[in-house]
Amino acid sequence: MKTRRHAAILEIINEYPVETQEELLNRLKQNGFNVTQATVSRDIKELRLLKSLSPDGKYRYTSINNSASDLQGNIQNFFNNSVIMVKSAQNIVVIKTLAGMAGALCASIDSINFEGLVGTLAGDDTIFIVCTDNDCASKLVIDLKNYL
């Protein structure tokens, strides 16, 4: 049942611009799934759904498993709306964001799999990215600034 529900959720968010858990819950019920808001919330977490800015300026649920071009488009929108500064210090890249945005942005960066990225760490408004070397960090800063 859970696998079918997860498949239905992915189908729904790909077909409709779902903005809220309540809207997703209602669409699931229309498709014959009798679920609670708590179940929908757990499903969103398990499926690693993100809210991304759509072309009409509204946030909607999207799957982290979208194609690379979709993910890059989502990250670009996310960057434009949340990043204050991107700098490198040797092999470490530091990204300053609006308060509360670092965690979600860090998860988005992790999903892209940039070459030479060793790991990421996010706080409330700061992300640290460790790269394999200084050149990799410099290239990553250029790539990330292109999103701005």
Image (cartoon, rainbow, N blue to C red):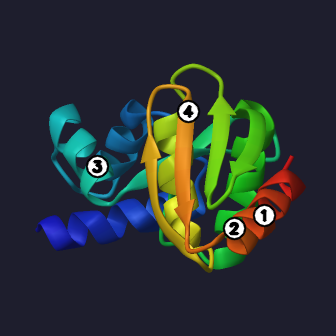
Identify the mark nearer the N-term, 2 or 3: 3
The residue at which mark 2 appears reads as: 134
**Which residue is identified by label 4?**
126
Residue bearing the label numbered 1? 138
Q: Secondary structure at mark 1?
A: helix
At x 47%, y 53%, the residue is 107
Residue 18 visible: no
Residue 121 on image: x %, y %:
43, 47
First in residue order: circle 4 vs circle 1: 4
Residue 101 falls in image quadrant: top right
Say which of marks 1 and 2 sits in front: 2
- Asked whether disc 1 touches disc 2, contact meaning CB atoms under 8 Å apart, the reply is yes
Q: CA distance from mark 2 to mark 3?
A: 35 Å
The residue that appears at 56% across and 74% down in the rendered structure is 132
Q: Secondary structure at mark 3?
A: helix
- For label 2, the SS is helix
Picture coordinates of residue 139 (x, y %)?
79, 69
Q: Nearer the viewer, mark 4 or mark 1?
A: 1
How far apart marks 2 and 4 lie (CA) works out to 20 Å
| Label 1 – label 2 distance at C-alpha | 6 Å
